[in-house]
Image (cartoon, rainbow, N blue to C red):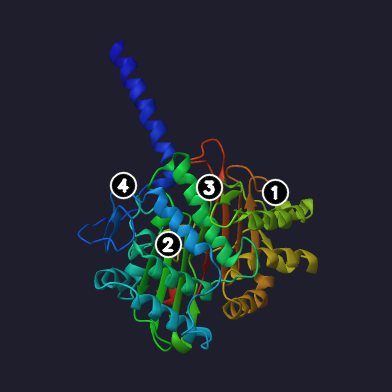
């Protein structure tokens, strides 16, 4: 009897741990290497081209990162007269010029799909990244990186664009303090540059960390790609930033837009849009590259009235308009032209607030998913995951 009870207790414990870790399981094929060195910052992990190992980054370092990244006025004057891609290249080169030889070797990597696909929704301690983590950068280096991000993300709307990115850093600091430990925190986000920054060739700026990944793949006159882009946050509730006195709720506006879209449909339209499957996570999350469903499901936007089509487009805009205005305008024009052939599907409730609530927008080009997950650090409270992909331009269309 004692042996039976002991086995059952152990089985229940292991089962509990298994389900608690599903959101943070190491992705297949991930390897972590050591042998690199940290930069002049105070990150406590070991850096290398395979990412970070060790205990993570202390809270003070993460708070310092957030304080510098919270400023929204560029300190760079050298690149001020440049515009568009030329300005991005100038700022990328300015950032690289601040790095030590060792740091540059970790940041500047060849452009290939193996390197480009090195992103995850997991904390870096559970899924290694390429590049250097923000905590390993000095104030000068971090300021140069901030100036680069200010050029590629929109700055006009609270909790969108650059502000949304800062909100993700603040939320991760909250997790570091409230049970997550040093695996979480703004210092654990990574930057890498794949290929050589140029206005004519193929290269990518990749910024990735827990619940946030944003790539920018440039390919001269052939255009660019800004997906796959991952957004998520825990907690979903507002979090405060001691650096600027602001509170952030990074993707609440997306949730509201999706709920407004679903509740704006008639009952028959909701029935057409509703899927029979329960979704416990994203379909095309990390590692699920170019496996778009062959059949589009749900409700075709072209069959909706103009005001309801506008609700679909409003949800799409909250992803596209995270980017600088010129880039966003080009992408949005394409998605708008394809809106009639874009589908909306959902599972769960139309409020989009409960665990396993799920919504999808699937067009000829655009693919967006939004899904509520069980709580990981903040137990008992669901939190959202979301991914934006593009059928043709993921990774700059280089598959």
Which of the two labelled residues, at mark 2 and mark 3, occupies the earlier sequence position? 2
390, 218: nearer the viewer: 218
Q: Secondary structure at mark 4?
A: loop
- Res. 333 image quadrant: bottom right
Which of the two labelled residues, at mark 4 and mark 3, occupies the earlier sequence position? 4
Count of labels in the image = 4
Q: Report x, y in % for residue 77.
A: 49, 82
Disc 4 versus disc 3: distance between alpha carbons? 21 Å
Which of the two discs, 3 and 1, sits closer to the camera? Answer: 3
Residue under numbered circle 2: 208
Disc 4 versus disc 1: distance between alpha carbons? 40 Å
Disc 2 versus disc 4: distance between alpha carbons? 19 Å
295, 348: nearer the viewer: 348
Q: Report x, y in % for residue 239.
A: 58, 49
The disc at residue 350 is: 1
Q: Is residue 256 left or right of residue 322?
A: right
Disc 3 versus disc 1: distance between alpha carbons? 21 Å
Q: Report x, y in % for residue 322.
A: 58, 68
Which of the two discs, 2 and 4, sits closer to the camera? Answer: 4
Which of the two discs, 4 and 1, sits closer to the camera? Answer: 4
Which of the two labelled residues, at mark 2 and mark 4, occupies the earlier sequence position? 4
247, 280: nearer the viewer: 247
Which of the two labelled residues, at mark 4 and mark 1, occupies the earlier sequence position? 4
The disc at residue 55 is: 4
| Residue, far top | 1
Residue under numbered circle 3: 234
Residue shown at 34% from the left, 78% from the top: 97
Q: Residues within 10 Å of mark 2 (few under 14, many from 20)?
A: many
Q: Is residue 154 left or right of residue 283?
A: right
């Amino acid at each position: 009897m004692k042996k039976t009870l002991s086995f059952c207790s152990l089985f229940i414990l292991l089962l509990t741990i298994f389900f608690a870790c599903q959101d943070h399981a190491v992705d297949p094929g991930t390897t972590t290497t050591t042998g690199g060195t940290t930069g002049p910052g105070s990150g406590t992990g070991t850096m290398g081209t395979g990412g970070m190992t060790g205990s993570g980054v202390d809270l003070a370092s993460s708070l310092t990162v957030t304080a510098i990244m919270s400023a929204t006025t560029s300190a760079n004057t050298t690149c001020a007269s440049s515009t568009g891609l030329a300005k991005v290249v100038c700022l990328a080169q300015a950032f690289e010029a601040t790095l030590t030889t060792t740091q540059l070797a970790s940041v500047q990597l060849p452009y290939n799909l193996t390197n480009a696909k090195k992103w995850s929704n997991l904390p870096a301690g559970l899924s290694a990244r390429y590049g250097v983590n923000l905590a390993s950068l000095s104030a000068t280096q971090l300021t140069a990186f901030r100036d680069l991000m200010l050029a590629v993300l929109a700055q006009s709307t609270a909790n969108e664009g650059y502000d949304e990115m800062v909100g993700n850093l603040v939320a991760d600091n909250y997790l570091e303090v409230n049970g997550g430990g040093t695996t979480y925190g703004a210092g654990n986000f990574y930057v890498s540059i794949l290929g050589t920054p140029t206005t004519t060739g193929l290269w990518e700026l990749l910024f990735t960390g827990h619940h946030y990944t944003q790539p920018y793949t440039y390919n001269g006159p052939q255009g660019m790609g800004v997906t796959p882009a991952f957004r998520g946050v825990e907690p979903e509730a507002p979090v405060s930033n001691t650096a600027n006195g602001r509170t952030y709720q990074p993707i609440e506006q997306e949730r509201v837009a999706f709920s407004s879209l679903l509740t704006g449909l008639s009952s028959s339209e909701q029935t057409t849009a509703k899927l029979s499957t329960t979704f416990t996570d994203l379909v095309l999350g990390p590692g699920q590259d170019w496996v778009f469903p062959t059949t589009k499901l749900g409700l075709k936007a072209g069959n909706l009235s103009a005001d309801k089509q506008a609700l679909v487009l409003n949800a799409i805009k909250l992803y596209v308009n995270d980017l600088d205005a010129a880039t966003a305008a080009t992408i949005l024009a394409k998605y708008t032209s394809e809106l009639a052939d874009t589908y909306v599907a959902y599972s769960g409730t139309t409020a989009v607030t409960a665990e396993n609530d799920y919504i999808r927008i699937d067009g000829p080009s655009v693919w967006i998913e939004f899904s509520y997950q069980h709580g990981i650090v903040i137990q008992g409270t669901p939190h959202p995951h979301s991914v934006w992909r593009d059928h043709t331009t993921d990774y700059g269309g280089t598959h």
